[in-house]
Amino acid sequence: MSKKILIVEDDSLFRNMLAEILNSAGYNTFRAKDGEEGLATFKASNPDLVVTDIRMPRKNGIQMSMDILRVSPKTPIIFISGWYDPERLYSENRESASFLKNDTFHLRFLKKPFHATQLLNMIREVLDPHKKHQAA
């Protein structure tokens, strides 16, 4: 059975491109356009991994991830963002900083732009951390 991945991204072209890449790699994808829809889709689909943008309307990726991790703390999450800077992220989200720095969560960050192989390699490492992975 293929692994299920939830993609949460407000840019529809980028969201569809990510889904195409992941589907062609054999993953089953679900899509959401913001954190509100992402949380509802997470609850309905129970994915193995979440790939999410950080800055989105209604509910951002940080807020959505905190909600997900409260009910499913072992769910790995990959944040993708064009502006990611750890210090800036934590200073702008003080409330969530200590929550997200919790070592028990499986959080990764990938800065845009990135190559599809970077994302696929990161997903493989997160979903199967004990297997030795080769670059795609």
Image: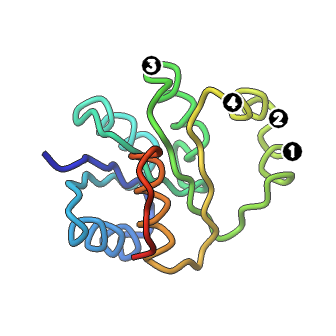
Closer to the N terminus: mark 1 or mark 3?
3
The residue singled out by tag 2 in the image is 94
Cβ–Cβ under 8 Å for marks 1 and 2:
yes
Residue at left offset 43%, top offset 62%: 133
In the rendered image, the vertical position of residue 62 relative to residue 56, given as above or below = above
Identify whether 107 is placed above or below 18: above
Please tell me whether mark 3 sits on a helix, a strand or a loop: helix
Determine which of the numbered discs, if any, sits on residue 71 in the image: 3
Name the amino acid type tagged 1.
Answer: Ser
Mark 2 and mark 4: Cα distance apart in space: 17 Å
* Mark 4 lies on residue: 103
Pick the residue in front: 111 or 37.
111
Which one is in front in this view, the residue at disc 2 or the one at disc 4?
Answer: 4
Q: Earlier in the sequence, mark 4 or mark 1?
A: 1
Q: Classify the position of the N terminus by image quarter.
A: top left
Earlier along the polypeptide chain: callout 3 or callout 4? 3
* The disc label shown at residue 91, or none: 1
Give the number of marks. 4
Residue drawn at x 49%, y 60% is 122
Around disc 4, counting alpha carbons within 10 Å, would you say few (fewer than 14), some (14 to 19), or many (20 or more)? few
Which of discs 4 and 1 lies nearer the camera? The answer is 4
Cα distance in 3D space between marks 3 and 4: 16 Å
